[in-house]
Amino acid sequence: MKRLCGVALCVLLLAGCGGGTTGWTGDLGSPPLTVMTQNLYYGADLRPAITGIVLGDPDMIVGSVTQIWATVQLNDFPTRAIAVVNAIEVARPDVIGLQEVSVFRSQYPSDAFTGNPTPATHVELDMLEVLLDELARRGLEYEAVVAIDSFDFEFPRLRADFELEDLRQTDREVILVRTDLPAWRLKVLDAFGSTFETNAGIPGMGEIPAAWAGVDLRVCGQTLRVLSAHPEADYPEIRYAQTLELIEGPAAVEFPVVLMGDMNTDAAAIPPWAAYELLVASGFEDAWLLAGPPEIGYTWGRSELLNDPADTLYQRLDLVLVGDHLGVDRVECVGEDLEDCVGGLWPSDHAGLVAQVRILR
């Protein structure tokens, strides 16, 4: 029988390098890796503020930013983080790709409308810190091995005392990796990431960069790359260019690649959107189509406020895609059912996706 990881077969069965207690159905030469992608959701729709900025209307900017921050608070990420960690605790993914992992900072008094504003530094909400704290509280051992900043903007809002205060939002693409596994089972070899070269630009704001992150792993003696990405949502031609950057850049390696994230391309549309067709034409296979249940697998579509129990999902934007020499044993959506709500809130406006992949060669 083929040897794996230089250990005896009995150790493989106990430790999970081939079947046994993990429920893995691949052959004993196929080390399993469970991956999860989850868009955490900023907590509000940013478009009203962008409209005010484009129009150059200070009153509209202040009003919309004030409303955005109020909505972020209503959508209460510390409560939603409990729901996200509930899914993580059940699935126990080895690698988690997170999108829309924002940190919000404030500064008083405001200087955003001056010619030389100072970046705000007082942290009001750090979504990554909140999530890691909740994981640690449960005894779930994960490390943020890479966090790549994407956009970083600051505009004023109106406080309760009718004074202006700057609100700064910095968005990040993050990858978490389990740290409670032995190094021969799962080891981080490298972590990296970048903003895309092609990005959308908005008058008054400049370029709005989107980002991707990656990690190279040694899984039971075999090398695997996992990429997590969040391409452009609103401009199809830019999303297509960013998807091509992924295919020709970080995904163009000789060892197996898993590409996941909120890809912002509807795989359930008829016909599918162009960026999805590009991914499939490049050789990636859709984990949901390989091993998913017969349902369509919608992952996005909830309203701005996450307190409507009747809200439904209607697009399949969140994907796990596998390259050459990879198979998929199972895949499932998480955070999609009413029972997943905590404190009357959905975990996010996106469902998450969990997949168990295996190296075939």
Image (cartoon, grey):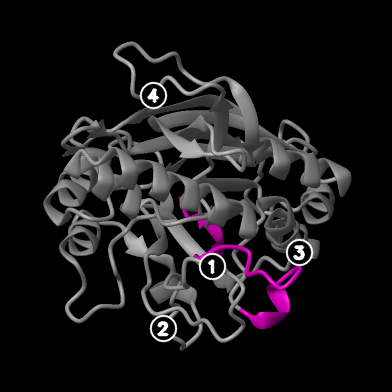
Q: How far apart are marks 3 and 1 (CA)?
A: 26 Å
**What is the x, y in percent for residue 118?**
44, 13
Of callouts 4 and 3, the N-terminal one: 3
Of callouts 2 and 4, the N-terminal one: 4
User: Which is more foreground, mark 3 or mark 1?
Assistant: 1
Can you identify the residue that label 3 sits on? 90
Foreground of the two, 199 or 11: 199
**What is the x, y in percent for residue 8?**
79, 44
Can you identify the residue that label 2 sits on? 296
Of callouts 3 and 1, the N-terminal one: 3
Q: Do the residues labelled 4 and 3 touch (CB within 8 Å)?
A: no
Can you identify the residue that label 1 sits on? 305
**Amino acid type of the residue tagged 2 in the rendering:** Ile
Q: Is residue 178 left or right of 148 when viewed as pictured?
A: right
- Considering the numbered disc 2 on the image, is that residue within a helix, a strand or a loop? loop
Can you identify the residue that label 4 sits on? 112
- Residue drawn where x is 71% and y is 57% of the image: 88
**Span colored in magenta:** 337-361
In the rendered image, is residue 79 in sight?
Answer: yes
Tell whether position 328 is magenta: no
